Image: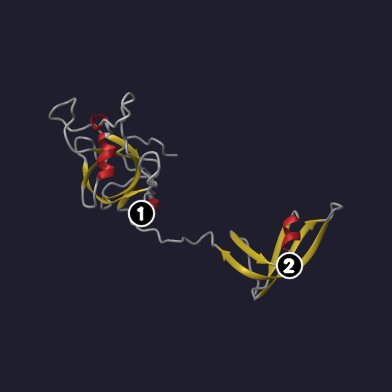
Amino acid sequence: MALSLLAPASLHLQSETDASLRKAGFKSIAVAGYHDKLCVSFRSPNPKGRLTQSKYHCKIVCLSVQQVSRRKVAVKPLELEDAKEPPLNLYKPKEPYTATILSVERLVGPKAPGETCHIVIDHQGNVPYWEGQSYGVIPPGENPKKPGAPHNVRLYSIASTRYGDSFDGKTASLCVRRAVYYDPETGKEDPSKDGVCSNFLCDAKSGDKVQLTVLQTKGMLS
């Protein structure tokens, strides 16, 4: 039985000739057979610059062949893959969509300078997006500069693909760094100047609501 290596593949071989193989500048490789022992034919330049052909019988430690045309995970729903135009102007700042926080996970260690969180948002497929787009997040509360008005929209690049973390097109992920202000004179944190939206997102719990808008231009889309 012949083994085709036209698809991307990785071979890990164990042989007494490993050292000599690593030193050779291989021009091509041919593999035949699929048994405990594998006959591998290498073409490599000899010291005089001419191509020579050598055969080594090696034990297979690991063989991995990936089919290029086969998807690892079934794409669902299919319309997300077949969309011709990016979703734009679905929800505006005056009429945002209310989504639900699924999870908030700290991405950095306890000694890291600052805090970055991975935030998964459930939008039930109602706020689709393309890779390169951003979500506008409206934090809860009142805008201190405009009494009675909501906070301004903060834009965050979407970290997940259009299929979301669950690969069903119903979630989106943000990676948010908590914005904390330290007084340069005292060296102490001044909570009144901390980032309103980043702290809201990093402090959010599963089940909390978040208001979303969609970037109204194509932005970073390629």
Q: Would residue 157 appear left or right of 12 to someone viewing this image?
A: left
Q: Quadrant of the C terminus?
A: top left
**Inter-mark Cα distance, 2 to 1:** 45 Å
In the depicted structure, whether residue 21 falls above or below residue 152? below
**Residue 141 is drawn in which quadrant?**
top left
User: On the image, numbered disc 1 is attached to which residue?
Assistant: 165
Residue 89 visible, this angle: no
Q: Amino acid at mark 2?
A: Glu
Q: Residue furthest right?
A: 48
Residue 109 visible, this angle: yes
Residue at left 26%, top 37%? 197
Q: Quadrant of the N terminus?
A: bottom right
Residue 95: image location, x then y, percent: 19, 38
In the depicted structure, whether residue 36 falls above or below residue 143? below
Residue 16 — which label? 2
Residue at left 27%, top 39%? 199
